[in-house]
């Protein structure tokens, strides 16, 4: 990779990055994966990294800040990434265009050529939130033929939808 940073991990670990706009729920999801309990989060400055083990598969999961100033450096985490988790705030209709741009920009990056993409339609507990189908249509996921992708509705506060997400991640690294 042409990365200037070395955010890699050892061979038996699978590298995962969690991306998405600020406030989408990335950090809550990461800690829900770990503890299955909602934790208090503060805006991520730089990155958090945690190891998640799913039935013998080891994932090193990087939670990257989503503020505009940090989005410009997302690419420095792409090297050797096997799975990209894109977290969408399903209540935030206004910024979905921005998410769409970031998604398609990411998919065009050479360091992510072989990565699979998991789109999490988060905050499903909020009344009036967009469904996973609406989000798929808005993000034009059907047009993506270069990458394996999957969309999953979830609620990071309760953890609903997250076990299914981990199952899908596991299936991806087993398949590869
Ligand atoms: P980020 O890491 O993507 O920036 P955070 O986002 O994980 O910090 O979450 C941002 C806010 O959204 C937090 O609220 C968090 O509790 C809330 N949130 C995350 N997931 C969900 C969800 O599924 N449903 C609801 N209703 N809220 C969620 P605060 O108030 O702490 O800023
Ligand atoms: Mg965060």
Image (spheres, rainbow, N blue to C red):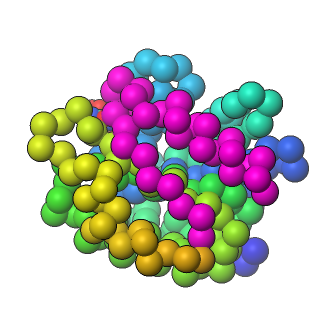
Asked if residue 25 can be seen in this view, the reply is: no
Asked if residue 10 can be seen in this view, the reply is: yes
Residue at position x 59%, y 37% in the image: 166
- Asked which quadrant contains residue 113, the reply is bottom right
| Depicted 21 relative to depicted 61: above or below | below
Query: In the displayed structure, does residue 9 sit left or right of residue 94?
Result: right
Q: Where is residue 36 in the image (x, y as percent from the top left)?
A: 48, 20
Q: What quarter of the picture does the C terminus occupy? A: bottom right
Query: In the displayed structure, does residue 56 sit left or right of residue 90?
Result: right
Residue at position x 44%, y 78% in the image: 143
Residue at position x 53%, y 30% in the image: 163
| Depicted 81 relative to depicted 106: above or below | above
Magenta extent = 147-176
Q: Where is residue 161 in the image (x, y as percent from the top left)?
A: 43, 34
Residue at position x 30%, y 67% in the image: 137
Query: Is 11 a magenta residue?
Result: no
Camera-side residue of 97 and 48: 97
Toward the left, the furthest residue is 128
Q: Where is residue 94 in the image (x, y as percent from the top left)?
A: 16, 63
| Depicted 114 relative to depicted 89: above or below | below
Query: Is 168 a magenta residue?
Result: yes
Q: What quarter of the picture does the N terminus occupy? A: bottom right
Q: Where is residue 131 in the image (x, y as percent from the top left)?
A: 25, 49
| Depicted 148 relative to depicted 57: above or below | below
């Amino acid at each position: 990779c042409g990365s200037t940073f070395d955010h890699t991990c050892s061979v038996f670990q699978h590298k995962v990055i969690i991306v998405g706009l600020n406030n989408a729920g990335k950090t809550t999801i990461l800690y829900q994966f770990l503890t299955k309990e909602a934790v208090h989060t503060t805006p991520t400055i730089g990155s958090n990294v945690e190891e998640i083990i799913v039935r013998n598969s080891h994932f090193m999961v990087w939670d990257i800040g989503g503020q505009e100033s940090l989005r410009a450096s997302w690419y420095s985490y792409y090297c050797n990434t096997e799975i990209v988790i894109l977290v969408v705030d399903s209540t935030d209709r206004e910024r979905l265009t921005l998410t769409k741009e970031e998604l398609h920009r990411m998919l065009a990056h050479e360091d992510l050529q072989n990565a699979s993409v998991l789109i999490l339609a988060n905050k499903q507990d909020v009344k009036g939130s967009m469904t996973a189908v609406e989000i798929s249509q808005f993000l034009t996921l059907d047009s993506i033929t270069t990458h394996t992708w999957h969309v999953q509705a979830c609620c990071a506060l309760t953890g609903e939808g997250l076990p299914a997400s981990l199952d899908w991640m596991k299936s991806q690294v087993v398949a590869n």
